Image: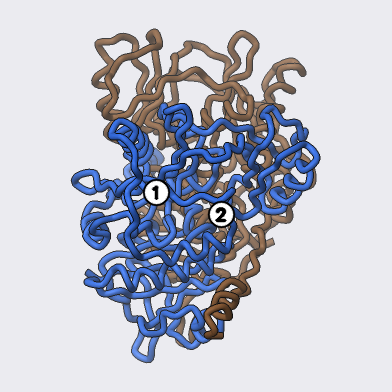
Chain colours: A blue, B brown
């Protein structure tokens, strides 16, 4: 299979997307990979496999690569003899943060009719925004970490007790996130968060909370990863998370009982099906008093959470064959014809 | 001002979008209009103003028009001497239903850096899906018409009393909508609705409910239309709504007291700001027991609800100058540089 890896993007996570894309070279060994880089100006470039090193991008060398144009049915390289369509079977959206996770890339792929692995536009919007994620999960009966929502213009009055964690609603990778231990620190932390977003969610910060990650997708059956208990710091800062996106070796399964594991999996499935069909995503859960609470959805997890799967490449291959199909719409100008007839102008 | 009217789209409402676009010729008289047609295959065509008649599209004549390619910064016509950018100041997204209202066109415009009037991607997704609209409105403290949500796989058990109205969550213009008077009719109506969507919302059908429409936008100030009490039938079927999209003459203001009018306007403002900035939208409210309930959001109303404004063209002109700006993101390869230094490879 020939997989086009879409990476980069106009995103705070542009650089970690490059790291994720490089990791794909190591974990998708049986596939042919076509690398399509979206630079910060949102121009598309075709990058040769051997050029897939981080310096190729940080140095600006990529600008010598072939530029691509997105048109009906695919990406095209313009050349002496006209426009040539890039050959691949499926695109894998690996752009973290803005563009990739906010619905723009999904919209582009769907509009131009390119088969793609990624959350669709609706799933992207609901998972990119942490407030909407909570509304959505609660509507499905999935419990979430308790929260308070504040807008830039809201009164800065907390209903939760300290310590709390403040998160801009729309960013990933801990950008603009602060742990606030007392009221004295609140204003500064909110100022920081509001630099990045008009809205924040505030949650109780639970020291040493048990956290479990579940990745997976649905093909003709459920393809769920092992459940991982990630290593915890107070919370991961951007540089630590960055390194995390280069992971390519398997991790240990969390040591939890089958009942809890089943609860985690049921919550994952409720969230995934049907909204996230076509994607391979990761959900991060907290377990408090033996109750499973959704913490966050990672619709395009770092390095696609490959390290959680026994046979990552096989999962991707099967997912590529089980994508949601866009509903066909017949446009036959029935109404225009009938109105023209009524007017006697047909 | 030169306004590019984007219309058509791969949508059940493709034809009424054509009608809306033709109406713009009559109501935006002082502006230069550039018509960009999105055909059912999602190819872009530049349509001359004098060709803007419904037969031009229903006959397929538009296929002789100049094809356009969407690239960074605009739409381009390919010619003998290379690629030429179409000149306009702003695009007005007038694609009703899929593509236009589901976030795809907004994503395209934002990705390619074209200034545009339309709900942004996030606002599109939340208003295109009637279930998410309800979750969103309730989270803002705006009351909604009571409802029950059913999925294709749910048990078909109603908690509401008859008569009810069943609506597919994702379609506009009454497609797939049924009024159900008794349990005997329920299965058939659900079968119809599930032909169009995986999810439905079911609401009490209130005979003769008072309905009021409020359109508007925010520029440097609120630009609200008059409040209209639309003419009611049991509910408008597709053909009646279709004719409605050609409206271009002012309507009478609803005869309601100032207190109620103010309640309607306050609800509109809560929903609009900040999510819908950049759009001119219409909200449809029900008034039950003197309480204002959101019925639906029309993020791209038929003929842009021009008939509700004293000076529609002036509103569009001011809105074009007050669009939300995308946050600038600096990508300086700081992390890649620092990791390369640490590795001694810089």
Q: Residue at x 59, y 20 (%)?
A: B293
Relative depth, front residue between A344 and B4: B4
Q: Position of residue B190 (x, y in %)?
A: 29, 24
Query: Callout 1: few (<14), some (14-19), or many (20+) C-alpha neighbours within 10 Å?
Result: many
Disc 2 versus disc 1: nearer the observer: 2
Q: CA distance from mark 2 to mark 1?
A: 17 Å
User: What number of labels is visible?
Assistant: 2
Which quadrant of the structure image shows residue A112? Answer: bottom left
Q: Residue at x 58, y 70 (%)?
A: B73
User: Is A76 left, or right, of B251 in this rendering?
Assistant: left
Q: Position of residue A181 (x, y in %)?
A: 71, 40
Query: Of label 2 and label 1, which has the lower sequence position?
Result: 2
Q: Position of residue A168 (x, y in %)?
A: 63, 47
Q: Chain of mark 2?
A: A
Q: Chain of mark 1?
A: A
Q: Is residue B49 visible?
A: no
User: Is A116 left, or right, of B31 in this rendering?
Assistant: left
- For the view shown, which residue lies furthest in the left direction? A220
| Residue on which disc 2 sits | A236
Relative depth, front residue between B210 and B145: B145
Helix, strand or loop for disc 2: loop
Q: Is residue A99 visible?
A: yes
| Residue on which disc 1 sits | A282
- For the view shown, which residue lies furthest in the bottom direction? A80
Q: Residue at x 35, y 53 (%)?
A: B58
Which quadrant of the structure image shows residue B109? Answer: bottom right
Helix, strand or loop for disc 1: strand
Tell me if residue A227 comes above or below residue A241 in the rendering: above
Same chain under badges 2 and 1? The reply is: yes
Relative depth, front residue between B37 and B278: B278
């Amino acid at each position: 299979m020939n997989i086009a890896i879409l990476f980069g993007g106009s995103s705070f996570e542009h650089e970690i997307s490059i790291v994720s894309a490089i990791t794909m070279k190591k974990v998708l060994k049986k596939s042919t990979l076509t690398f399509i880089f979206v630079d910060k100006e949102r121009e598309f470039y075709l990058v040769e496999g051997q050029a897939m090193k981080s310096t190729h991008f940080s140095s600006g060398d990529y600008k010598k690569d072939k530029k691509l144009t997105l048109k009906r049915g695919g990406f095209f390289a313009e050349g002496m003899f006209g426009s040539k369509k890039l050959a691949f079977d499926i695109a894998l959206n690996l752009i973290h943060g803005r563009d990739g996770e906010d619905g723009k890339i999904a919209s582009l792929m769907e509009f131009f009719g390119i088969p793609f692995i990624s959350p669709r536009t609706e799933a992207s919007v609901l998972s990119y925004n942490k407030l909407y994620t909570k509304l959505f999960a609660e509507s499905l009966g999935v419990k979430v970490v308790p929260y308070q929502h504040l807008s830039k213009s809201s009164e800065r009055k907390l209903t939760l007790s300290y310590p709390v964690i403040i998160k801009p609603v729309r960013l990933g990778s801990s950008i603009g996130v602060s742990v606030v231990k007392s009221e004295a620190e609140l204003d500064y932390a909110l100022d920081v968060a509001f630099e990045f977003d008009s809205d924040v969610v505030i949650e109780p910060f639970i020291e040493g909370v048990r956290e479990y990650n579940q990745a997976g997708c649905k093909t003709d059956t459920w393809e769920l990863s092992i459940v991982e208990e990630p290593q915890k710091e107070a919370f991961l800062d951007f540089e630590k998370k960055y390194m995390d996106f280069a992971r390519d070796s398997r991790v240990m399964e969390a040591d939890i009982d089958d009942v809890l594991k089943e609860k985690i999996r049921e919550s994952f499935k409720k969230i995934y099906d049907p909204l996230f069909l076509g994607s391979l995503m990761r959900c991060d859960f907290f377990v408090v008093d033996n109750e499973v609470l959704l913490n966050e959805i990672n619709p395009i997890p770092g390095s696609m959470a490959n390290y959680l799967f026994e046979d990552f490449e096989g999962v991707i291959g099967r997912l590529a064959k089980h994508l949601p199909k866009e509903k066909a719409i017949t446009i036959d100008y029935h109404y225009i014809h009938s109105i023209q007839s009524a007017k006697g102008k047909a």
